[in-house]
Image (cartoon, rainbow, N blue to C red):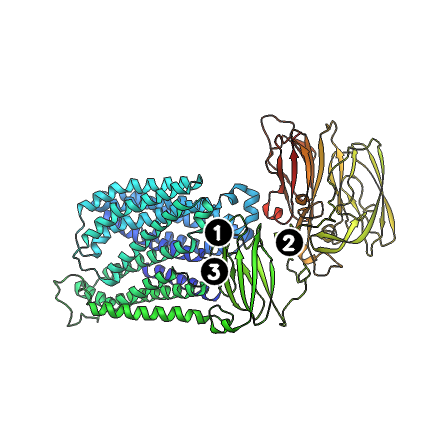
Amino acid sequence: MTAIVTGFWIIVLVASVAGQLILPNPRWYLIHVSGLGVAGASILIWTWHFADALTRSKQSQPHQIIRLALQSVGTLVLAGALATTGMAGVVLGVLGSLMVCAAFVWHSWALRRAMGAAFVSPGAVTLRYHLAGGIIFIIGALVGLIMTIDVTSFELAQSWWPALYENHDAMALVHVFAMVLGFIGMTVLGTIVTFGPTVGRTRMSAQSLRWAGRALPVLISAIVVGAAASLAGLPVVAGIAAGVWVVAAIVGVLWPVFKTWRGSMLGVGDGWTIGAGLIWLVAGCAVWAVQLALAPDAQEARSVSGGTYAIFLAAGALQLILGSLTYLLPVVAGGGPAMLRQSIEFLERTGALRFFVLNGAMVLALMPFPLHVHNILLGAAGLTALMSFVLVLMAVVRQKRPESKPSETSRPAQERGPRPMPDPHLKSGAAIAAALLLAVTAGGYGVQSVAGPGTSDNQNAPVTEVDVTVSGMSFVPSQIKVPAGNRLIVNFENTGDQRHDLVFDNGAETGPVPTGETATVDAGIIEESTEGWCSMVGHRQMGMTLDVIATGTANSHDSDSASGPSNGLPNLPTMAELSADPGEQFVPWDAALDPAPEETVHHVSLDVEEVEKEVAPGRTQTVWTFNGQTPGPVLRGKVGDRFVVELTNNGSMGHSIDFHAGDVSPDEPMRTIEPGESLTYEFTANRSGIWMYHCSTSPMSVHIANGMYGAVIIDPPGLEPVDEEYVLIQGEQYWSSDLTEGTDADAVAYGTPSAVTFNGYPFQYDHEPLSAQAGDRVRMWVLDAGPNLPLSFHVVGTQFDTVWSEGDYLIDHSEDSGSQTLGLLAAQGGFVEFSPHQAGSYTIVNHAMSNAERGAHGKLVVVDN
């Protein structure tokens, strides 16, 4: 079972690294496969083995197999969640996390039960470390579950729990404290207390046990303090706590164990490898502690370590596991001392070579080489780890064969442990490893196609040099054109408010670039159109992509239109494009409301017109409108008022109208009329509300998305006057490449809008803000016209003391309670009231933030009286 499970995860790890050679993947997969897959399975197996050995309690093997199955399947499901987005990713993430948690809850309970056995050896301090690691793992896994929801579905995370997105970096730090310092760190430290002297063929000292017992509460306290400081936004304190953990680990556990190794006969395959693994793990934690202490905030603390820390973790965990298996599997296989010596000698023949290749590759992977070279180095380390595991299995198979006998040249039985490795052997192993790594690194530069950076052809090709900056969550420009065959050099200046990078499809990258700094990346020769993006978590999904168009090729797109292909895929402009300055000629849709007129009968003329108009900066298309505007005219009245609407179709196709404010049979008044026809729609407003009206001709979603919607406001009885009153109607735009049609019906069906607007134009009230005076009573009527997306209406910096939604007050002029959002589904509406007391710029958003970042965004500027 041990061999099967461990071998499976090492193969998965190698496959994951190999996949990066073809398509660079986020380092999350390397972290989770090495940390949760390889290390997690090994910890489950060997802590169970140590519990049996140290307490002589025979635990149920079927139970252990079930726990291993839960852990392994759950890890695979979780890895699938990280490669999936939306609700599917959330479901997989929750399922995988709960399966892994269940395995370790059960495992921790079994450890605690074993510690209560009648016989407990003096080395039982190991089990206390194991139990602490298991409990901390469960806490860390629950934090990881929350983060998985954020990674797989930004929209769900932001709508369900807005603070989740804002605290993602802090939770990531808590997750590292729990999983690395707690789960892996505590388990490794506890194990080495008793296992270290065994590998060194020396005796366990009473001093080691005492120091380990004293260090345990210090280590746990450091983890708790570090996690709490991370959540509190105090990375300096978190860094100090991580540093305390490192010192306690060295002084309390590692140094006493290393002292027992003095003069011992450590084998390269097990002892050297375990020692290197410990050094990698503790060194990684020390580097991370320094990075935390120097970081100004959680986002910076997280971004500076990412890939580097993954390499430390993988190198440490892999070598600890391989070194332990090199010793333990031959011992467990049995066969007597002579057989065991023969197996160890078999493994030692290539021990130095494997040791230097694996560690040399990891050291070079820390160097500032291009991404594809890093992937090759990690691949070399992963293949070496797999080869080491295969050799251990071969040694065990040889050992268990009945016909296998010790070599006549074997050392006398009274000798214990492998003989020290001769210096020439070590030197030759180091020389071979160095040559191999040099070849791998040099070859890595040539693995790329002719477009790859660093080739001689690049240096001779014509150069196209481009400057790229950041605006919000977009690159500016978001599209660059390069003559096919030219070498592209990008000068990237991070003008945003957080750390970004720029990664190209061929592996060229800038690395993380702090705010205000500049980096240059050679993207190589551009033979065909490609793409760049920001690889920080979630930034690519939020629109940080850079299209590189190779001109002069068969697949080049030379159009300057903001529209894209109408192939069923959404046409997604960047936030920078949607929020660009619309120009001096721009006139915003007037959101100010007049009071309801005194008359009780309202005669209204609505003309269907198909007009060409600007719907976003640089995007002009044909839209379908009521009276030439989107949204259509706002109608207002009181309960009991009668409306007589004359609809005339001046368009080129059939249209209709549906008033939600009317309580009438739809058969006649909502029928579709052909071009040139008219109809009269009469209704009495029997109930108050902000009611949607829209074209109801099929496909209704397309007619609404292309501009045919508006609002009818029927005041609730007793509605008090206010100082400022506005109406904001959310609508969605789905751009087509055919500007005469305007809307892409496939994109509407998929629910993937190009823009989300308040009153028909993205970000228009950022450029032409609404206004009020400090202390004014402000009422905002809100309607979600859809056709698809919900609206979580919020005004940053305010609290609503009055919220009226779908016919009822949720709160009414409350003094001791309030509301932060008005939540509406498509075709729902209401109003909010508040009084801003301080001058300033108050941001109006749909707090489903991906929709705000697509245009459902504005400002209310408040000035002093």
Q: Disc 1 vs disc 3: which is toward the camera?
A: 1
Q: Disc 3 vs disc 2: which is toward the camera?
A: 2
Q: Earlier in the sequence, mark 1 or mark 2?
A: 1
Q: Earlier in the sequence, mark 3 or mark 2?
A: 3
Q: Using a 10 Å C-alpha cutoff, classify the residue at mark 1 as few (fewer than 14 neighbours), some (14 to 19) or many (20 or more).
A: many
Residue hosting label 1: 514
In the displayed structure, 527 sits above or below 295; it is: below
Q: Do the residues under discs 1 and 2 have CB atoms within 8 angstroms?
A: no
Q: CA distance from mark 1 to mark 3?
A: 22 Å
Which labelled disc corresponds to residue 577?
Answer: 2
- Pick whichever, 313 or 656, lies toward us: 313
Image location of residue 38, percent across then percent down: 37, 57
In the rendered structure, the answer to whether residue 1 lies left or right of residue 537 reads left
Quarter of the image containing the C terminus? top right
Image location of residue 262, percent across then percent down: 18, 55
Q: In percent of the image, x 59 and y 62: which residue is there?
A: 547
Residue hosting label 3: 25
Image location of residue 219, percent across then percent down: 31, 43
Q: Secondary structure at mark 1?
A: loop
Residue at the farthest top position: 815
Q: Secondary structure at mark 2?
A: helix
In the rendered structure, the answer to whether residue 442 lies left or right of residue 822 reads left
Which labelled disc corresponds to residue 126?
Answer: none
- Pick whichever, 529 or 401, lies toward us: 529
Q: Secondary structure at mark 3?
A: loop
- Pick whichever, 854 or 15, lies toward us: 854
Residue 119 can be seen in this image: no
Q: CA distance from mark 1 to mark 2?
A: 23 Å
